[in-house]
Amino acid sequence: MITLTHYLVLSALIFVLGLFAVLTRRNGVAILMGIELMLNAANINLVAFNKFVAPGAMQGQVFALIVITLAACEAAVGLALVLAAYRGLETIYLDEINLMKW
Amino acid sequence: MTGEAIAFYALAAITLLSGVIVVSSPNIVHSAVALVPAFLGVTGIYILLNAEFVAGVQVLIYAGAITVLILFVIMLTEGGTGLRLQQRNEQGTIGAVVAAAVAALLIAGATRTVWTPQPGTLATYTPGAIGQSFLGTNLLAFEGTSVVLLVSLIGAIIIARKED
Amino acid sequence: MTPYAWLIPLFPLAAVAVIIFRGERLPGRGAFVSIAAIVLAGLAGLQILGEVATAGARADLTYRWATLGNRPLVVGFVVDPLSAVMLAMVGIVASLITIYSVGYMRGDPRYPRFFAYLSLFQFSMLFLVLADNFLFMYAGWELVGLCSYLLIGFWFERPPAARAALKAFITTRVGDFSMMIGILIFFLHTGTLSFTGIFQGIQAGQITGPLLTLAAVLVFGGAVGKSAQVPLQVWLPDAMEGPTPVSALIHAATMVAAGVYLVARTYPLFILSPGRDALSVVAWIGGITALLGATMGVVEDDIKRVLAYSTMSQLGYMFMGLGVLGYSAGMFHLITHAFFKALLFLGAGSIIHAVATNDMKAMGGLARTMPVTFWTFLVGTLALTGIPPFSGFFSKDAILVAAYAQNKALWVIGTVGAFITALYMGRLIWYTFAGSYRGAAEGPDPQGGHGGARPHESPSVMTVPLVILAGCTVFLGFLERPFGEFVRFAGAEPPPGPAGLVALSVLVALAGWAAAAAIYPWRLVSPSALRRRFAWLYTILVHKYFFDDVYRWVFLGAGSVLVLIAGAFDRYVVDGLVNAVAWLTGRAGWVLRYVQTGREENYLLLIFLGLVVIVLVRLIR
């Protein structure tokens, strides 16, 4: 019997995978991919709560849809930034983008 | 073992394994492509959760648009050369530790809490219900999101434009 | 008038304010204002004395100032025979001296300020005299000390004067500190600062035994400092650096007498101490100082210093008198001494003004050239040495009679002191007035005045006060009996001594004069021969019994050590701590700046790390 807890654990694991990517990858695009994973994990949480805890309204799924939309926007803008950075700095590896470092 | 359970564990396995490839592959293109099964796994999860419309949107947007977008950008920057560079930065181990800790906390929090379900039942035809709420109680969020879409569209075009 | 006695100190206080703000543009450059104030005060004082003496007026003007916790702080003024005679004496003597100063300080660049300081002192002294509680008395006490400092160091451009002012203030401070401790002990045990309250408290047994003696002796410590008694006498000779009117007013007649007044006012503290031990302390310190001061005066060449030692010695007599239950005798000597010592100092000032030096060896023959000064000075000297019918004879004799009845040893000391007093005063008269003038034609001007080529009599603004004081000196003596009836303390009335005691005192004084005559004018023994013969004694006396040297060694020496330690502590520990904090901050900043890597992957890591830590901490609690 699959309960809410299963979904929550799964979403936690996906979130942590995304977090790991964000923290440890050098490639800017890879970091964005990690962010997408984290957003997905949150969405799973939302939909799961909608079904198991608050089934009366569609709030959870609505929220998840909005999150997907916003994730798309954010991916677009983020990747545009990566492109622009590549054009100017010739690199997308974050540890090489250090003009502002001491 | 019910069918639901089998489905759940299978989908979970697909998602997690693809996720691992996404986050740890030295080849950025492999990572990007591994996103697809990950997203499709999540889609399956949504269907298990009776969120069909969300699942559909997930496939369209995530597995479709976003993955393609990422692959585009990888090709337009130098990632497509397939060089086996060091992809992990210097805080690899501690990042893993922190991530594991966060995981432990989240799981601990999730398992210990008692979630009391509220009254009500889920609508059977979700797209209709979602549509009703988007144009009903969540109208403002709907409109706001469309504005954000517009703005990010314009923004992305401007940022990524070639300067000439 | 009596109930308004508290207004009297305000006259000179108003004068101070006026002179400070308008000084130069006032009539007489401030002098007239000051004189007017003190003369008014003096006349009012006389009026009150009359009222108290004839009509038996008394006043106890109290005022509840504040409430400390659940105790009221009641302060006020008292008018009784004791304060009335002090009021009158201070008023008259201060008036004469202030008038005299017009002549003495003429031409001084800080002329108005001098009179402002004089008026401030007069206010403080009058306030002190009228106080009926320790708080006011201590306030007046400190104020007169301040004025003493200001006036001794009036010519502060001269390093000796500046040093002397500081020495006076610090030495009396030691005494004041002791006095404050004594006051606090009394306050602690009786809950009040008013004299009558404390006396009642002692009689009610709130403070008894050795503690009472200790507290009384501590209060007496203030008198020891202020009246230059042993062991705090070291400041008085140096205080002669101040202008002579200052020496006359403060260090002869009034401020130094405040110590005697203190003991008289708080007499029950001493007489009620077990075994009258506190009283014995007073008597013995007085006796020792009387002898010590007299002996040091014999070898001194500076005319003002001789008079300073004489003052020290005579104050010792006053304390001795109070200590042997001769209450009226001691107070009477205070009053007579105020007049004739002021006279002597003003006369000395007249001389110094004329010959521009303090050194007696450089004077001589002034009896002919300065007759008024000479005759008035002689009157003062005769009074001081106790020759009848001058006032000093009556008062000093009364003390000796009381001493004979109470403590023969002290009587012997007092009599020997009288002999030495006559000896050094005779010496002074001889060097200053007799023979022919030994002075230089031109010389440096230590205390103002004209050059020394042709000494001449001082202007009348200076000589008239001399004559007035001489007159008082002549006639005051006959008031001994009425004074004894007027200012007395029950239980402190000595019996009349054996017949012949008085005659013995006179003989001793005459013997002292004879000895002076034998050494100086008649040359039966030469001074230099005596000096060689008693070289050891001479050395001790010239070095003032080495008090200054011991004090410098011990206190300044210990002080220097403390200074070194404190300095090192300040430099290394305190500064070190502060510098260490600064260094620590710098190092911490240097180290911590590496946190700002500029790389957001590091920041993200920190964010999530922080999240984990916070949640863990929350879980653990």
Image: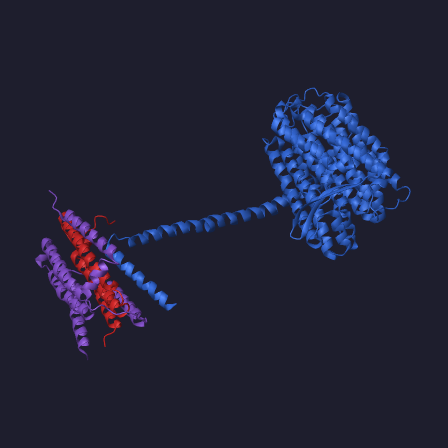
**Residue appearing at x 41%, y 51% in the figure:** C581
**Residue appearing at x 71%, y 53% in the figure:** C190
In this view, the residue in front, C235 or C439, is C235
Query: Is C125 located above or below residue C432 in the figure?
Result: below
Residue B11 location (% of width, % of height): 16, 71
Q: Colour of chain B?
A: purple
Question: From the image, which quarter does the C terminus of chain C lie in?
Answer: bottom left
Q: Is residue C418 visible?
A: no
In this view, the residue in front, C612 or C153, is C612
Question: From the image, which quarter does the N terminus of chain C lie in?
Answer: top right
Residue lying farthest to the right in this orientation: C499
Residue lying farthest to the left in this orientation: B81
Snapshot quadrant of residue A34: bottom left
Residue B26 location (% of width, % of height): 13, 62
Residue lying farthest to the bottom in this orientation: B1
Colour red maps to chain: A
Residue C175 location (% of width, % of height): 67, 45
Query: Is C175 located above or below residue C303 in the figure?
Result: below
In this view, the residue in front, B57 or C189, is B57
Snapshot quadrant of residue C287: top right
In this view, the residue in front, C333 or C555, is C333
Residue A64 location (% of width, % of height): 22, 62
Rendered image coloring scheme = by chain
In this image, C460 relative to B161: left or right?
right
Q: Colour of chain C?
A: blue
Q: Is residue B146 visible?
A: yes
**Residue appearing at x 18%, y 69% in the figure:** B45
In this image, C32 relative to C322: left or right?
left
Snapshot quadrant of residue C506: top right
Query: Is C513 located above or below residue B3 in the figure?
Result: above
